[in-house]
Amino acid sequence: MKFYITTPLYYVNAEPHIGHTYTTVAADCLARFYRMKEWDVFFLTGTDEHGQKIYEASQNEGLTPIELADRISEIFKNMWKKMNISYDRFIRTTERQHQEVVKRIFKILLEKGELYKGEYVGFYCIHCESYVDIEDKSKPICPDCKRPVSEISETSYFFRLSKYQTLLENIIKNSEIVKPEFRKNEVLNFVKSGLTDISITRKNVVWGIEAPINEKYTIYVWFDALLNYLSGIGYLYDEETFKKYWPADVQLIGKDIMRFHHIIWPALLLALDLPLPKKIFAHGWWISGKEKMSKSKGNVISPEYYINEYGVDPFRYFLLREIPFGMDGEFSEENFKKRYNSDLVNDFSNLLNRSLNLIEKKFDGYIPEGEIDERIFEMSDEIYKKYSERIENISFSESIEEIWKLVIFLNKYLDEKSPWKEKSYDVEKTMISIFYGIRNLLIFLNPFIPQTCEKVAEMIGLEKKEIEKFENFKIKYSGRIKIRKREIIFQRKK
Ligand code: MSP
């Protein structure tokens, strides 16, 4: 089985913020989940580097656009490294190979009659890199970001989007392409309201891929950027890889870029006679101070602070646990700390401390051998089924809730058996069962908090590879296992 997953390509006009880390961590979690099922996974992310917005940002910083793109794409890569993002490829739209693919696709579409030359008269929002409809022409403001827009009137090549209206309607209605489900109507209504052909070349934008024709045009940045999902896995130059992974299984996006992904993108694929992605899931926004975070509003929360103050894994955990994936959520330190102290410190870290302490005291650090409480395996089985179902449905928070049933069970089990008391019985059985319960937790939590799971595995005498396959949660070891050096995994924060 294969699993191809993508994130949007992030603009290089600004450094990564929490919104970007959100989509990327979610994609990473899915990629890790399917790798643990031993599927053949391809995880693509990268940066979107052309267009007016980047050009202007570079001018403001006194750099050339490619200098800015080199600098910011490096910062994205470093951030992903810090956050243990296991992408298979980081694509940059300024790469030669990507540019070649975009030009060839332009030519193919031109030859197929999917493009035609016309005149674009209308408004353009540089911030959204989008052609926009304006209600009040005396005050031309972007309907989405509310910034002033510019008027353009120029010859251009158009893509026949309108031609796909009925086909798209049917596809959206009858497939899983628009996710979550509650977004379907919104997209359908937009399609039904009428699609107009879109201009895919610009006359006076210098920072873009040159259109492969005898006139001077650059290619519209969204046309360029969307095609990364094809060029990133070899379309038109490595057919074997492309055939192996296309169509995409899950494409993650924020709800801000649904129209590009749920309408223009499938239409382009239809025009190219390519199969459509299985799911394009739009998640909600992190809000800060009641507004969507953005550089210009000055309410951007830096991931660095949380990573340094709490650690990478608590940050990953919070992003995926706090809010159901399709919904908006307020990002605040207060909520972060609450979640951190209750789930990671009280429930998880304390379970580890108490258990390992006992094993050290009572058994000299050796995991006792003998009978295991079968409930641990029965429960793990059931949890794994539900957890898988939920994660396959892209419900991260709900899937963690499932896993947490085991954390809660183990804590309760320990309390009930009270193996620290003088007169406790079944101490061996209790502790060996707790050990296997913890082992299974590490397997289940691995896609979410991989670094922590690896560290704890090492602490309890296991190897990394033993918690890297879901299959392994059924295994019972033979031979003595000794816990290694112990440390407190998560410290309470005041
Ligand atoms: N370059 C385009 C995408 C091209 S894809 C072919 C773009 N880039 S972006 O840098 O603006 O990043 C947009 C994505 O970042 C959103 O779709 C979303 O995935 C994520 N987020 C940015 N801000 C966000 C929040 N405040 N909250 C959650 N995620 C948001 O659009």
Image (cartoon, rainbow, N blue to C red):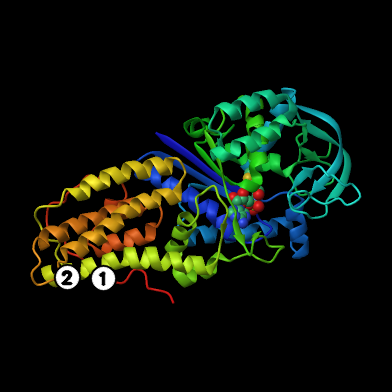
From the Cβ of disc 1, is ligand 1 less than 8 Å away?
A: no
Task: Determine whether 273 is above or below 190 in the image.
Answer: above
Q: Which residue is mark 2?
A: 360
Where is residue 321 shown, x and y percent of the image? 45, 55
> What residue is rendered at 54% in x and 51% in y?
23
Task: Determine whether 476 is above or below 427 in the image.
Answer: above
Total marks in image: 2
Task: Identify the image quadrant of the C terminus.
Answer: bottom left
Residue type at mark 2 is Glu
Residue type at mark 1 is Arg
Where is residue 306 shown, x and y percent of the image? 50, 68
Where is residue 436 shown, x and y percent of the image? 21, 54
Is tag 1's residue or tag 2's residue first in the polypeptide sequence? 2
Q: Which residue is mark 1?
A: 486
Where is residue 466 shown, x and y percent of the image? 26, 52
Q: Tell which of 256 and 53 is nearer to you.
A: 256
